[in-house]
Amino acid sequence: MINATLTELSGALAAKQVSSVELTRSYLERIRRLNGRLNAFITVDEDYSLARAELADAARARGEGGALTGIPLAHKDIFCTRALRTTCGSRMLAQYTSPYDAHVVEQLDRAGAVVLGKCNMDEFAMGSSNESSHFGPARNPWALERVPGGSSGGCAAAVAARMAPAATGTDTGGSIRQPAAMSGVCGLKPTYGAVSRYGLVAFASSLDQAGPMAKSAADLALMMNEMAGFDPRDSTSVERAKEDYQRSLNLELRGLRIGIPKEYFGEGIEPGVRAAVEEALRWFAFQGAKTVSIDLPNARLGVPVYYVLAPAEASSNLSRFDGVRYGHRAAEYSDLADMYARTRAEGFGAEVKQRILVGTYVLSHGYYDAYYLQAQKLRRLIAADFAAAFERCDLILGPTSPSTAFEIGANTDDPVKMYLNDVFTIPAPLAGLPALSVPCGFDAAGLPVGLQLTARHFCEAALLGAAHRYQQGTDWHLRVPTETPL
Amino acid sequence: MSAWEVVVGIETHAQLATRSKMFSGASTAFGAPPNRNACAVDIALPGVLPVPNRAAIEHAIRFGLAVKGSINRRSIFARKNYFYPDLPKGYQISQYEAPIVQGGEIRFYLNDAERVIRLTRAHLEEDAGKSLHEDLHGMTGIDLNRAGTPLLEIVSEPELRGAREAVAYARALHALVTWIGVCDGNMQEGSFRCDANVSVRRPGEALGTRCEIKNLNSFRFMEHAIEFEARRQIELLEDGGKVEQETRLYDAERGETRAMRTKEDAHDYRYFPDPDLLPLAVEEALVRKLGDELPELPAARRERFVREYRLPAYDAGVLTASRAAADFFEALAQASGVDAKLCANWQIGELNAALNRDALEMQDARIAPGSLAVLLKRIADGSLSNKMAKEVFDAMWAGEGDADDIIEARGLRQISDSGEIEKIVGEVLAANAKQVQDYRAGKEKAFNSLVGQVMKATRGKANPAQVHEVLKKKLA
């Protein structure tokens, strides 16, 4: 049962083949067994999960509830929850429990989902490997000495290892899609404004977007039906009619115009990644899709633009962690300035400090125009590239990440090399576009490769449809990691 | 050596009269126990987001229209970053490059001359909380009730000359914001706070180095502080020194300003557009609607009072110092039907004096316009002398009842019956042959003595004008 998709689990619950309590128990058992090795979860409260499962069973017994009622899920530890602490992977919030639930958490609670726990992540979502977590790195279920990707690395590892059938993640520069690719699961970063950011601990507000991670595109759609929607508490949430993300799962591929940016198939891509992605492209062509060569000339500027804008916003967003009202506070200090300095020196890890410094620098008097303002201009050029490309195609296809999962510690001394991991995932959030990653094969070392599809704003249903059709014709997404057999 | 010119620009923080805060749903009510009116957004818990308050935006637009400024159809909220314990987010949401109101002017009278002071801008922002040091045994307490309260920061050009003009500007601005209802104007509670940028120069020279004086929470303090600061700068320059650009705090107890921070330790606020908030788009229709709803403004009403009621400019200015005063005057003039100048005299004289004595605002006046109107009618129809009317006014103010009741109870009705006056005058003349003789012999003083006798005989109730007239006639 733990290998089933959400759709299957939902069916089993509805048919009373299994109870939510039984299902929850089996996932909790698996977490207990595997988490010591994978470090995918930071916090688990079995009693709480089981109490929620009992409520879900009771609701189903009364004939109430929807598709997700009784389904166990995991949350990235960036979503505020009243029931479990919200650490954001940081010492700063290691003991912090939120007095309110994030919008996404509320929505899934209301849908009757059962929270299994909170997943490991890079500290404040800053990282591509889950190595910057205060709680230690999460590990890749396909190769334990390798990273699961990041920042939603714990979620990806949990779903891949069948410790949870699905999870919520967040993506700022690729934090859903890149770990999904490296851990062999599916992940969707929705259009900016589709899912409320209320209760999501902010990293870079103009880029942060919550989205689902699961084993199939159809499951992502099921999750999106509950996660997305207008929320007046988030001024950047877009007010639009509620949509059914499953409506286009049987998308007609014949005549679908798939854009191929040559920039996404250039140098720096591992051969195993290129081969798997090209194979996927051939599959779509065989189904009748048309491939269109497109240009995204400014996409290569995405990484530098992102590494100006995201730290700038982060430096300001993280100012509230000052030891005054909540979170870590230094035990000893001589005066106010010393209290701030020690609190933040102790509470934040190296990667977070580095980004706060960069962000503070690029916003400083005399540097603002050269860095922040310039980056904003380039951001608009990147968005314009996509707008022009989507005049000629319906979807853009490419690799999610230039490489498969690397070894823990391999990139920690070289931030630039680490940051280049995000080269293909960064452009979509800069343009606010929806993009997803689905498994499309393995490299020679047996590590999963991710295929990225990008669509126009609010065209998630088409993205999910194309991915679902692909998953009906292939079985990459059904493979079980070698290190964590069923 | 030529005189010094004192140049002042004023920055005002007017708290906008809204029920909830600028970016959260918490109450803005003053005086709650510490942190009672601070919600998750105000405390800046992880994950919370700001949502702009529509009422605050509409107030800002009303203000912009009232000062004939331009309303930016697209303005930007920016973050002003600095660390302070009463600033929960580590940044204040304000407007920087694109404020909601640009330009505009404030008009007022000083020494019978109209002054027009241009505004640079007015922008929306949120207030910070308060740090408390008393009764905390060396620790600092943080009260976030005020954090997030909506403010309109109104910046004047440095066009004010001297402390008196600066205060006149601030009073006119205060009158305007309360007049249009965007701010309650309560200075004790900090709803209307001014900072003054003061510099001095020889007339015709370029602007001197300025100092910003903070903490001017009354008009009196503002005048003292600017005078002190100007004197300080002049003495410094005349002694061959240099004014350093700095922020200074006014100490009301010592009556002086003292340095708070210099330009060197000025913050780099690292302003940038707040990514949590979209650019604020203001629709044309809303601007038009709010413009149509604006009440008649002080300047227009002042002009109308001169035109319609034929009042001197000074009177019209005093009567339009607040909307409540102007409303009172028009109600009084209409209800009484007497000469508008008589109404103006009584409101500016007796009524304002009584309000000042009891430290009351116009809306708390103890006599309603309708009641005062009855009193003025009695003056106009000759029933009361001015002196008697003042006695009646005081009794009314003390709550003894309506004018007519008090006149009746105290037997204050003026004797204006000419037959009766002639009879009394006849009696007085008969009883004071000596004075009559003296008057006829050319001693003018004797006449006054005779008037006094008549008034005494009537216990002051005789109409003095009539007494004069009858006496003159009988002595002719």
Image (cartoon, coloured by chain):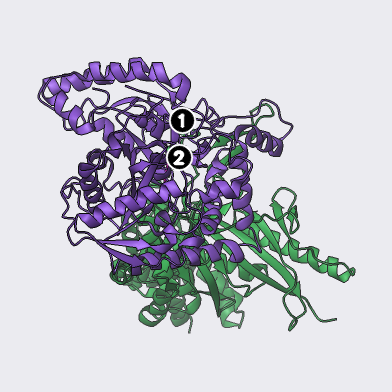
Chain colours: A purple, B green
Residue A369 place in picture, x, y as percent: 59, 66
Q: Secondary structure at mark 2?
A: loop
Q: Residues within 10 Å of mark 2 (few under 14, many from 20)?
A: many
Instruction: Name the residue at 61% across, 29% down.
Output: A329
Q: Residues within 10 Å of mark 1 (few under 14, many from 20)?
A: many
Span highlighted in magenta in the image: B44-49
Furthest-front residue in this view: A444
Query: For the residue marked with disc 1, what is the amino acid?
Result: Ala
Q: Which mark is residue A201?
A: 2
Instruction: Name the residue at 44% across, 27% down.
Output: A40
In depth, the one of B439 and B467 nearer the eye is B467
Residue B291 place in picture, x, y as percent: 33, 71
Residue B261: in magenta span: no
Look at the magenta stretch and give its main secondary structure. Answer: loop
Quarter holding the N terminus of chain B? bottom right
- Whether residue A441 can be seen here: yes
Residue B153 place in picture, x, y as percent: 52, 60
Q: Is residue A386 left or right of residue A135?
A: left
- Whether residue B182 can be seen here: no
Badge 1 or badge 2: first in the primary sequence? 1
Q: Is residue A278 left or right of residue A462?
A: right
Q: Which residue is mark 1?
A: A143
Instruction: Name the residue at 42% across, 31% down.
Output: A142
User: Disc 1 or disc 2, which is closer to the eye?
Assistant: 1
